[in-house]
Amino acid sequence: MASGSSPLRLGVNIDHVATIRNARGGAHPDPVKAALLAAKAGADGITAHLREDRRHIRDEDIAMLMAALDVPLNLEMAATQEMLGIALRHRPHAACIVPEKREERTTEGGLDAAGQIDTLRPIVGALGEAGVRVSLFIEADAAQIEAAIQLGAPVVEFHTGAYAHLDGGTRAAELRRIADAAALAAKNGIEPHAGHGLTFDNVAPVAAIPQIAELNIGHFLIGEAIFGGLEGSIREMRRQMDLAR
């Protein structure tokens, strides 16, 4: 880590352990066991997305994660009354509000916070009053950051999917956009995070952005675990992140 740089946290998303479990039914592999192993390997927190269709994480997983974890749980959730009720019942450390479409394979982009302020305001307010740290999963865009300011969200997480799937000059331009947005968020007292599509090969430039405090990574780490084990994949990601700082 470079002198004077702040530590960069790693949140490990264990959704796709549940995806594998659900493909055959039953209880294996256990996402709670994966979460505990991730924490042992150096994860600073665990992320889990409870989707409307329960395609991977299920309600009982959230209850068991809350009971088992010593590290913070970040609950990804859509801006619905059902999910708000679940979040208020469990009161995880953090709740990241994400866009959600039933037909998508994975989250395809950032939340349009600027266009949904009236919908989001009571949800963000209720979560904050319950002591849940609210994050908005948004594109690296000034209008979305302004919406986060208006909503009083303490955290934004920038969608890095476009960055991850571009190359050359277009990737460099997207990286600059993320860096500029991180600086703008931090200037306004909002803690910037980032995630989606990050791998060993592309994480370093994002990790090097000094204002970003946390990266949330899941699918890639679960996939790499097939070849080198979950602990090994997390330790290598942690190493790449630390080298970038």
Image: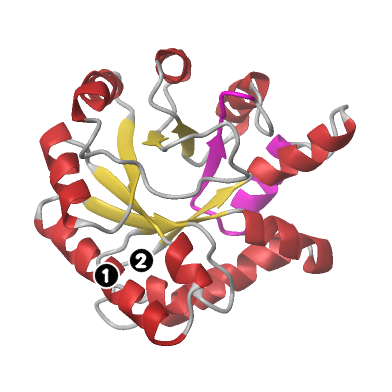
Image location of residue 244, percent across then percent down: 42, 80
Query: Mark number for residue 156?
Result: none
Image quadrant where residue 85 sits:
top left
Amino acid type indicated by mark 2: Pro
The range drawn in magenta is 31-53
The answer to if 123 sits in the magenta stretch is no
Image quadrant where residue 142 sits:
bottom left
Contact? badges 2 and 1 (CB < 8 Å): no
Picture residue at 84% right of the left edge, 36% below the top? 23
Picture residue at 20% right of the left edge, 30% below the top? 117
Quadrant of the image containing the N terminus? bottom left
Quadrant of the image containing the C terminus? bottom left
Image location of residue 18, percent across then percent down: 73, 37
Dot 2 corresponds to which residue?
A: 7
Disc 2, SS: loop
Image location of residue 25, percent across then percent down: 87, 28
